[in-house]
Image (cartoon, rainbow, N blue to C red):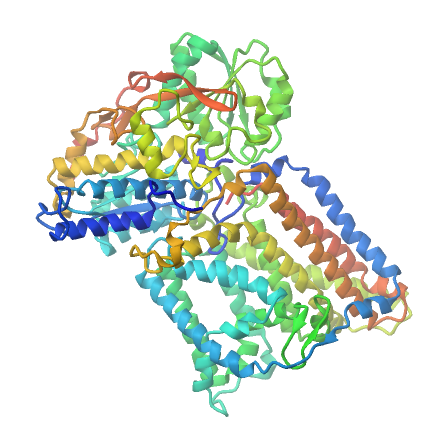
């Protein structure tokens, strides 16, 4: 007798899934009524057209497109940011305390709400579009500046590059996707403070900069995503088309290149593992999803598999281009490693676009809980800032019109990010090729990958989800 | 988003709790304080909430109802002169987590009882742990698993009827008013099978028959190809489809039949928390639904329903008073309100003082029988069966008329009664 199953119906606003993904689209019923197939065809054609168009255009147009303009550099922010880190540290430790001593309901506790909704969802997007906010709120910079010595007692091997960060980021993704209760306040507090202490000790022993570049995965993540911002104020202040700074930071080393792929693969699997398709593969009825505890290992193995698969597919796509150029082109042969480490940068916009799309609905719901929790941080009946009188609504997920707007916004982010990726890849290819034909050859595999991934991304948005 | 003064959120509930505490300490005047209590320590009720997971939408409304019910109880002086405190833990709509949460209630939070669970698999996964912990576990799940005997003496469902009773009580109205030849369309898994089995038996008892049973795979998102299997002789289509495909199902069913259709009967579960006026649902005009509690306020609305809606912040269309598009889970969430009032009545009857009286509390609830429609039971009268730990109540059949669910028939308590399948009172504590 499984009455529960009925409740997994359309009626359910699937605020489910992972730690941060507390609110998923129950508007799936309305989405299924939208002509998503037509939209998907349109989006895919847009990406394909951008590939054709950019191949026909003179390369100097793209060069000009990505050329930044210099801004008046009047800001001396480095010292200010170091100071603000202390505030970040204080807020972080305060949140940890709230995690243990505050409300037991994760939707009333500021720790999971802040970490998953504000930090993981919103800060990620702000970092990639608006400003280097991580530099301001990084909870380690301040304390590490006190603890770090000029000559650290231990030295991280340089040849490790950022591989430790890749590994830790994967573990973090496992926590999000596969842990049984990543939003449980005390549990999250334990994980968060454990990682904070681990990082602080590491920075003390090995140097804050070195640890931040090689081991601390969020600093590596936000530095990579941050390169997409149009405006950069550090060093020399400049502004340009999104991704201009990413282009100037290539080629990456292999670890950072793989990190770019891991961001996208993990985000993609986060979407995939909720679909009817994935649950059917596991033999699970999506209408009576048995809970996260039943899929810990499938989620973990699937996440690792998705990452391996994307690295292999991407490498193969690059290899095809490199071989096509070598066999059919007239430009100098391009080493595979150099091509891999260069073109991986073009994955970053897609990763950001997927992140935005995937978490948009979650954010719209959870930020309401966040505001209410701010009005009563300890859950003791306070009514600060008049926020306690707010009421959470998910009415925008119950209405066809708003669901359509949300869906199209998500789809636009996916398509736009792919177009930007195409432009960036073409710009990078131009550095290795002497003709448009050679550029086409070098990107033949990547172009297929871009179009395929667009289809996949739009499919993810359109298919029913059940976990 | 602003909260009307009649609405109660967690903060006002907590303020109520605070006021109660003040009253207990003699600061506040009035007879509704907690002053008579031997202990002024709060009664702690662990609320196993679907805050995350596939039950989250229900969790949100169960939470709102629980908060409002506890605020009312505290305003009335609490339980046995003691304030009531809700301790909320997220079970993730996950049975394993559900069992862990019960353990936290018993060992970390020192809760007196646990309450609130909706999804059957969480109930089934948690109930054995409740038995081991000897923690009274009041569920609001509708599942037949309580009355079927598969759980234990510590698990009770006194505030909401079960699916077997609901389905059974529909058959007389369907057979007498809509037709005797029924085609059932249901999802092909346990939930759908329950409906198939319970209703087939019930309609046959009414002299009717199920002329076709059309099982739809759970992952299906397009349904047109199943409709030709509906026999021409069909007088009533009984549908219990759930999942993201429900809107598509209704739309395609409408396109298939066009203007001439048989009578259509469904369960509102399919469209719980979804406006009946949503695009694509036009075909539902003139069709019938089971409702646990009428979503739309009726012309003969009781004072209890009116006050209950006001307390939980729901308007006359069953939507949030803060956002008319935010439709509540009105057919089910009353169960939280009523269950909390039953816990209160049980504790008062048992003169409950602390965890040592848990067995007395269960015995007191088992002794309950008829519960009249009242502010404690705004959905309607109930009759609790202490042997099976399951309550029985009235059921509503509504027809969609001009986009509104209008009650056509109220099935009696007797219509939903069935033979006992267990006697939990024979189990020792």
Given residues B132 and A243, the one toward you in this image is: A243
When the figure is inspected, residue B422 is found, relative to residue A176, above or below; the finding is above
Asked whether, in this view, residue A62 is left or right of residue A287, the answer is right
Q: How many numbered tags mark residues here?
A: 0
Given residues B50 and B312, the one toward you in this image is: B312
Res B174 → quadrant: top left
Residue at 62 percent across and 44 percent down: it is A405
Q: Is residue A2 visible?
A: no
Residue at 90 percent across and 63 percent down: it is A437
Res B136 → quadrant: top left
Asked whether, in this view, residue A301 is left or right of residue B94, the answer is right
Given residues A49 and A241, the one toward you in this image is: A241
Given residues A287 and B4, the one toward you in this image is: B4
Residue A97 is situated, as x and y percent measured from the top left of the image, at: 34, 67
Q: Is residue B169 visible?
A: yes
Residue at 61 percent across and 21 percent down: it is B254
Residue A430 is situated, as x and y percent measured from the top left of the image, at: 83, 70
Res A280 → quadrant: top right
Residue A180 is situated, as x and y percent measured from the top left of the image, at: 42, 54
Residue A112 is situated, as x and y percent measured from the top left of the image, at: 42, 59
Residue at 54 percent across and 22 percent down: it is B284
């Amino acid at each position: 007798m499984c009455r529960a199953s009925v409740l997994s119906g359309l009626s359910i606003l699937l605020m489910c899934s992972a730690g941060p993904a507390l609110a998923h689209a129950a508007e799936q019923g309305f989405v299924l009524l939208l002509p998503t197939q037509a939209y998907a065809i349109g989006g895919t054609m847009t990406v394909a057209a951008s590939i054709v168009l950019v191949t026909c255009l003179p390369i100097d147009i793209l060069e000009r497109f990505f050329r930044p303009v210099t801004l008046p550099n009047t800001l001396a922010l480095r010292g200010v940011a170091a100071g603000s880190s202390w505030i970040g540290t204080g807020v972080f430790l305060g949140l940890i305390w709230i995690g243990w001593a505050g409300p037991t309901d994760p939707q009333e506790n500021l720790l999971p709400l802040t970490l998953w909704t504000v930090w993981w969802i919103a800060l990620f997007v702000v970092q990639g579009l608006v400003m280097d906010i991580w530099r301001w709120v990084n909870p380690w910079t301040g304390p590490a500046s006190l603890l770090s010595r000029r000559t650290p007692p231990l030295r991280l091997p340089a040849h490790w590059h950022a591989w430790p960060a890749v590994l830790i980021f994967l573990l973090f993704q496992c926590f999000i996707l596969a842990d049984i209760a990543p939003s449980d306040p005390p549990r999250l507090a334990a994980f968060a403070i454990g990682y904070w202490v681990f990082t602080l000790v590491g920075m003390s022993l090995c140097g804050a900069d070195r640890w931040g570049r090689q081991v601390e995965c969020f600093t590596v993540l936000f530095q990579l995503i941050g390169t997409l911002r149009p405006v950069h104020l550090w060093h020399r202040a400049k502004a340009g088309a999104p991704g201009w700074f990413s282009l100037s930071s290539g080629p990456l080393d292999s670890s950072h290149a793989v990190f770019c792929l891991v961001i996208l693969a993990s985000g993609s699997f986060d979407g995939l593992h909720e679909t009817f398709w994935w649950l059917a593969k596991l033999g699970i009825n999506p209408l009576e999803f048995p809970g996260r505890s039943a899929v810990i290992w499938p989620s973990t193995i699937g996440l690792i598999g998705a990452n391996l698969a994307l690295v292999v597919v991407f490498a193969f796509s690059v290899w095809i281009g490199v071989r096509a150029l070598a066999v059919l082109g007239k430009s100098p042969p391009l080493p595979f490693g150099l091509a891999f480490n260069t073109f991986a940068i073009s994955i970053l916009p897609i990763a950001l676009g997927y992140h935005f799309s995937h978490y948009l609905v979650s954010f719209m719901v959870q930020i309401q809980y966040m505001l209410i929790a701010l009005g009563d941080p300890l859950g003791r009946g306070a009514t600060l800032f008049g926020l306690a009188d707010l009421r959470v609504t998910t009415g925008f997920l119950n209405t066809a019109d708003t669901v359509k707007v949300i869906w199209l916004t998500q789809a636009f982010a996916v398509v736009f990010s792919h177009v930007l990726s195409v432009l960036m890849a073409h710009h990078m290819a131009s550095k290795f090729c002497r003709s448009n034909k050679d550029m086409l050859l070098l990107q033949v595999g990547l172009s297929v990958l871009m179009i395929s991934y667009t289809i996949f991304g739009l499919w993810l948005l359109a298919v029913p989800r059940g976990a | 988003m602003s909260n009307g003064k009649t609405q109660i959120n967690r903060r006002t509930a907590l303020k109520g709790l605070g006021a109660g505490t003040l009253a207990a300490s003699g600061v506040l005047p009035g007879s509704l304080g907690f002053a008579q209590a031997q202990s002024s320590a709060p009664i702690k009720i662990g609320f196993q909430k679907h805050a995350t997971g596939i039950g989250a939408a229900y969790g949100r409304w169960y939470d709102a109802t629980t908060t409002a019910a506890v605020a009312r109880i505290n305003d009335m002086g609490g339980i046995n002169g003691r304030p009531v405190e809700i301790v909320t833990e997220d079970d993730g709509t996950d049975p394993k987590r559900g069992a862990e949460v019960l353990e936290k209630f018993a060992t970390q939070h020192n809760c007196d009882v646990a309450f609130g669970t909706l999804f059957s698999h969480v109930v089934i996964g948690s109930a054995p742990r409740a038995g081991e912990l000897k923690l009274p576990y009041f569920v609001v799940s509708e599942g037949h698993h309580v009355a079927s005997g598969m759980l234990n003496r510590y698990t009770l469902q006194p505030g909401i009827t079960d699916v077997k009773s609901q389905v059974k009580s529909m058959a007389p109205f369907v057979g007498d008013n809509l037709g005797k030849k029924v085609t059932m369309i249901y999802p092909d898994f346990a939930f759908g099978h329950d409906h198939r089995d319970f209703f087939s038996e019930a309609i046959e008892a009414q002299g009717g028959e199920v002329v076709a049973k059309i099982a739809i795979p759970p992952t299906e998102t397009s349904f047109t190809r199943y409709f030709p299997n509906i026999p021409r002789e069909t007088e009533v289509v009984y549908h219990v489809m759930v999942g993201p495909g429900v809107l598509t199902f209704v739309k395609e069913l409408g396109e298939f039949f066009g203007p001439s259709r048989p009578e259509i009967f469904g369960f509102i579960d399919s469209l719980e928390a979804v406006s009946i006026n949503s695009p694509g649902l036009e075909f539902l005009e003139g069709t019938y639904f089971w409702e646990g509690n009428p979503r739309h306020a009726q012309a003969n609305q009781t004072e209890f329903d009116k006050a209950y809606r006001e307390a939980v912040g729901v308007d006359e269309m069953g939507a949030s008073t803060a956002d008319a598009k935010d439709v509540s889970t009105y057919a089910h969430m009353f169960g939280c309100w009523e269950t909390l009032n039953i816990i209160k009545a049980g504790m008062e009857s048992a003169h409950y003082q602390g965890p040592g009286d848990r067995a007395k509390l269960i015995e007191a609830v088992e002794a309950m029988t008829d519960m009249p429609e009242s502010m404690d039971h705004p959905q309607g009268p109930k009759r609790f069966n202490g042997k099976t730990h399951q309550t029985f109540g009235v059921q509503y059949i509504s027809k969609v008329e001009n986009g509104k669910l209008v009650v056509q028939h109220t099935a009696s308590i007797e219509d939903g009664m069935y033979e006992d399948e267990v006697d939990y009172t024979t189990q020792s504590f």
